[in-house]
Image (spheres, rainbow, N blue to C red):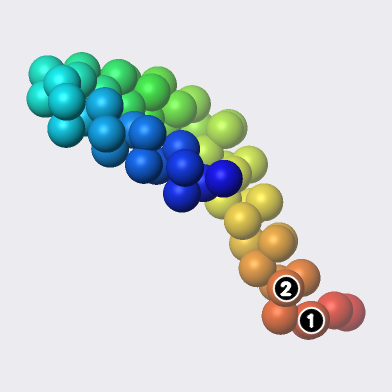
């Protein structure tokens, strides 16, 4: 499913090169908005660290 979506996006970008700059601008705006919220960043890092510890089988 991911490959189909990726192929569709790449196909659109090949057909319409202006979409690349628009997509980059939108992604940059989204990332900047998310990184401007310290609580969201801290929660995301904590969640990622917790999932990584659980996947290794380390418990108390």
Which label number is shown at residue 14? none
**Nearest to the observer: residue 31 or residue 4:** 4
User: Label 1 vs label 2: CA separation?
Assistant: 5 Å
**Nearest to the observer: residue 4 or residue 35:** 4
The residue located at (79%, 81%) in the rendering is 57
Relative placement, left or right, of 14 versus 58 is left
**Residue 13, x across and y down, in percent:** 21, 30
Relative placement, left or right, of 49 versus 31 is right
Q: Is residue 8 visible?
A: yes
**Residue 54, x across and y down, in percent:** 76, 70
**Nearest to the observer: residue 30 or residue 2:** 2
Question: Compared to 55, does 12 lie above or below?
Answer: above
Which element is circle 1 on? loop
From the image, which quarter does the N terminus lie in? top right
Which element is circle 2 on? helix
Badge 1 is on which residue?
57
Question: Compared to 23, does 60 lie above or below?
Answer: below
Question: Compared to 53, does 10 lie above or below?
Answer: above
From the image, which quarter does the C terminus lie in? bottom right
Q: Is residue 28 visible?
A: no
Find residue 16 and report its image quarter.
top left
The residue located at (51%, 46%) in the rendering is 2
Relative placement, left or right, of 42 versus 6 is right
Badge 2 is on which residue?
55
Residue contact between numbered discs 1 and 2, judged by CB atoms under 8 Å: yes
Find residue 6 and report its image quarter.
top left
Residue at the farthest right position: 60
Question: Compared to 13, does 45 lie above or below?
Answer: below
The residue located at (65%, 68%) in the rendering is 52
Q: Residues within 10 Å of mark 1 (few under 14, many from 20)?
A: few
Residue at the farthest left position: 17
**Residue 23, x across and y down, in percent:** 26, 23
């Amino acid at each position: 499913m991911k490959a189909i979506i990726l192929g569709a996006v790449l196909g659109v970008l090949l057909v319409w090169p202006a979409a690349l700059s628009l997509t980059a601008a939108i992604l940059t705006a989204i990332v900047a908005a998310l990184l401007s919220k310290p609580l969201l960043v801290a929660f995301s890092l904590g969640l990622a660290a917790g999932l990584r510890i659980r996947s290794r089988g380390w418990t108390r």
